[in-house]
Amino acid sequence: MFTANQIRSEFVDYFKKNGHTFVPSAPVVPIGDDTLLFTNAGMNQFKDVFLGHATRGYKRAANSQKCIRVSGKHNDLEEVGRDTYHHTFFEMLGNWSFADYFKAESIAWAWELLTGVYGIDPSKLWATTFAGDKADGLEPDTEAAELWAKLTPLPRERVLPFAKKDNFWEMGETGPCGPCSEIHIDLGEGRCDKQHVPGHKCGVNQGCSRFMELWNLVFIQYNRMEGGRLVPLSSKFVDTGAGLERVTSVLQGKTSNYDTDIFMPIISAIGELASRKYTAVLENQSDIAFRVIADHIRMLTFSITDGATPSNEGRGYVIRRVLRRAARFGRQLELREPFMYKLVPVLAGEMGSAYPELKARAEFVATVIQAEEASFNRTLDRGIDIFAQAAAKAKASGTVSGEDAFQLYDTYGFPLDLTQLMAREQELGVDTAKFDELMGQQRARARAAQKGSSMASLVGVELPATDDSLKYTADRCEANVVGLITAAGYTTSGSIASTEESAAIVLDRTCFYAEGGGQVGDCGIIETATGKFVVETTEKIANCVVHRGKMDCGTIKVGEQVNAYVDKNRHASKRNHTATHILQWALQQVLGGSVRQQGSLVGPEYLRFDFTWPKALTADELEKVTALVRGKVAADEPISCPVMGIDEAKKLGAMALFGEKYGEEVRVVAIGAQSTQEMHQAFSREFCGGTHVSSTGEIGGFKIISQESVSAGVRRITAMTGEALVGYLEKRAGVVDSLVDLLKAGPEQVYERVEKIMAENKKLVKELKSAAKSGGADVMATAKELLDNAPSFGASKVIVGRIAMVDIEQARAAVDMLKKKAPSSAVLLAMADEANVTLLCGVTDDLVAKGIKAGDIIKEVAPLVGGGGGGRPQMAQAGGKDPKGVDDVIAKTKEIIAAKLS
C-alpha cells in the first residue's frame, strides 16, 4: 500500500522522468499577488506565465502545491469534518506545459501514472470532455474524446461529454481559459449516498459520492476578453491538478480522507490529549470535532509557517477564525486548556520530509498558536454562556438576533461563522443582515479619514519605464518630463500649475529612490527655470518611478528639462537601512537562527524592525544586541552591493526576505565585504534593493528606543541612528537637567530621588484607597438610611438624596444595592464637593417599562448643577460644576418620579 509521502514522490518522479522540472511548492501566503488571500491552486505561481507577463527557464513543470481554501468562491469551511473529503488545507499534485506539449501527452501520462504506477483498476475509470457551448461559439472537444479512445483502453461509452459548468476552466471573468478533461473513479455501488433519493441514478457528475473526480486536465487555449469574447491564444498551455488527499484515500482503500495516513497520526494525537477514542462515524459529534481539529491544525501550521499570523484583518483574521473554530470544537472533547499547539510537532514529524520548513519553524508556530489559544480561552466560556442565553431567546423566532451575534463578535471574539455554526447545531439561524449593519456602523466609526490614492486613476494605464540607476550613487540629476499625473489621470501633454492639488511627475531618468523593501520613498525638489515642484514621496508602479507632491510655484510642462534634487534626509535613511541589516544579524547572534524578519520601516528619523520571537527581550538580551551593533559601527566595516544571479547569491548564503518575489538577478548587500570576491568575509548578506551607506562607520551611533509586541509571536524593535539619535539624546539630557533643577539634586542622585518619591506616592495611594474603602462603608450606611426614609408609591420606592463624595464605582455599587433591596424603585444619589457635582441615577426594569428612564431623568435635572449627562434607561450619570444646585436636583427628581408614579 502506498503511503501519502510515496504517492507524492512517485508523482513528481514520474514527471521528472518525462522531462519536467520539479518546482517547489509556492508558500500558501501568495508572493506578489494581492488578488488572493491564500494560494488556492497549483497554477497560482504560474499565473504571470499564463497571462503573458513572464517566462520561466523551463517548458514543463511538476510539483505538489500547498493550498488553502477558506473564503470567497472556494470556501469549504462549513463542510469540513462533516463529510469525508472537504478540507481547508490540501495538496494539489500538478503538471504544467508552457507552450510545449498539449492534450495527447497530458492524457497519456495521466492514464499511465494512474494505472501503471499507482495500479488503479482501469475498469473503474471514466473520463469527461467538453461538450461545447453555443453562446461562446465553441465546438465540442472531439479531439480530447478521440485521444482518450486512441491512447487508452477506455471504451467510448466511458468518455462522457459535459457542458461548460463541469468541463470548461476559467481563471476569472477575464483572462486565460479553456476546455478540460476530468478523470473520475467508480468507487462501487455501496459508496452512493443518494440511494434514498427517488429517481436517483448513479453516474459521473450526478451528485452522489459513488463517482469521484481524481484528476482535472485543463487545456488553456483561449483568452476571455472584456465583454466576454473569446480569442485564441498564440501559445497553448496545460494545467493539471489531482488532490493528494483524494488520491491517497483511493490507493489506501479508505472511504474517507480522514482515515488515511495523512490525518490518522493527528487524530490519534487528539485522542491522547482528550482521552477519547475516534470511531470514524460520520454523524457522531465527537468524531466531527476530531476531524475539524485535525483539518484546521494543518491549515494553521502551514499558513503560520509560511509567514501569516493571527490578526483582525485580511488573512490574519481568517487564521484567527479557523483557530477559534477549532478551539470551540475542542470544548466538545472537554479540551479546556490550550491544546492545538501540541499537535504542531506531530504534523511537522509527518510532513517535514516533504516540507522542511515545517520542522524549521515548528517551535515558532506552536508558540503563536498557544498564545492565540490562551487569549481566546479567556473569553470562550463566557461567550458560550452568552450564546446559550441568545439561543434561548431565539427559540420562538428561530433566529439569533444580529445584536446578540454582534455582541459575541465584538465583546467575546466569536467570528460570525462560529456563531452560525453553534446556531445551526440548535437548528437556529442568525440575522446576518442586522449583524452586517452593526459591523458597518462600527467600521464607519473606526475608519480614519483617509484620502483616496492618487494612483487609483492609473489602473490599466501603461506607464513608461524610468531609468533609476542613479538612485544608489547620486542625489541630483538632469532629466526630461515624459508624463504628468493629476486627478484626471495620466497625460503625456500639458502642464501642472496648481499649488492646491496633489499631482505627480514622471521623468525619463531619476536619482530618487522609490518606496520599497521597507524603505520610505525619497522626497525633494524637481524644478525648472519657470517652476518648482515639491516631491513628498516617490513610488514605483511596475518599472515607472512616480514622483508625488505639489507645485510650489510656477508651472512644469511635459517635454521640459528639469533638475531633480533629493532631500538631504536621504542619507539618514541610508544609515537606518544599513543599521536594520546589522540589527537582524545581531538578533540572530543573541537569540538564535529562528529569528526571521516579518517587516520593517526605514525612514530618516528612525528604523523599525519586526521579527519572529515569542516573548519580550530581557534587558540583558537588549544590551547584548546593542553592543553587537555598536561594535560593527565602530569597526567601520566596508559594504558592497553587487548584482548577481539569484542561484549564485543563494550559494553565497545571502538571505532572502520571506514573501518577497525576486527575479533571475538580485542585488545583494554584503556588510563586511569590500567586493564580490570578499563576499565570504561578510557577516551580513541580504537580498536588498534599498539604499545603504558605504561603510558601517557612517551610521554614527545606534540606540534601541523601544520594543513591543505586534502580534502573537512577532516582536517590534524601534531604534535610532546618526543625527536623529543625537537630537533624541539631547532631549533626554534636557529632561534630566529639568529634574536636577526640580529635585535640587545632582544628575547622579536623580534616579534615587525619583524612586524615593514614587515609593512615598505608592504608600499615599494605598492609604487613600484604605480611606476610600472606609468612605464606601459610610456611603452604604447613608444609602440604607435613604432607603429607610424613602417614600412609597404603591409597591415602588423613590430613593433620592446626598451621599459623601466617593469614587464612581462605589457610588454605582450603592445604587445597585438599593435597587436590589427595593426591587421596584427609582434611585438618584448626588455627590458634591466645593467645585464638582456627580449625579447617579438607577431605575429598576419594571419602572422602565412604565416610562421612567434614568437617562431621561439625568438629562432633565443635570442643568440645575450646570452640567449634562445621559446613559441607559436602567443607569445614567451626569457631572456638574455648581454644588449649590444639588438641593434643587433632589427636589426636582422627586417631583418627576412622583408625577410619573401617580
Image (cartoon, rainbow, N blue to C red):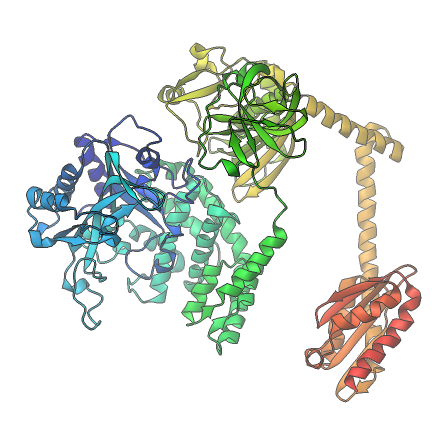
Q: Quadrant of residue 738?
A: top right
Note whether 861 is above or below 521 in the view shown.
Answer: below
Which residue is located at x 40 percent, y 56 percent?
A: 273
Note whether 630 is above or below 195 in the view shown.
Answer: above
Report x, y in % for residue 797. Answer: 78, 83
Residue 624 in view, yes or no: no
Which residue is located at x 21 percent, y 50 percent?
A: 214
Report x, y in % for residue 385. Answer: 53, 68
596, 515: nearer the viewer: 515
Q: Quadrant of residue 665?
A: top left
Residue 797 in view, yes or no: yes
679, 175: nearer the viewer: 175
Q: Quadrant of residue 658?
A: top left
Report x, y in % for residue 581. Answer: 53, 24
Left or right relative to 824: residue 212: left
Left or right relative to 440: residue 826: right
| Residue at the limit of the structure toward the bottom, as seen here | 794
Note whether 401 is above or below 712 in the view shown.
Answer: below
Left or right relative to 514: residue 216: left
Quadrant of the frame with the C terminus: bottom right
Report x, y in % for residue 133. Answer: 22, 51
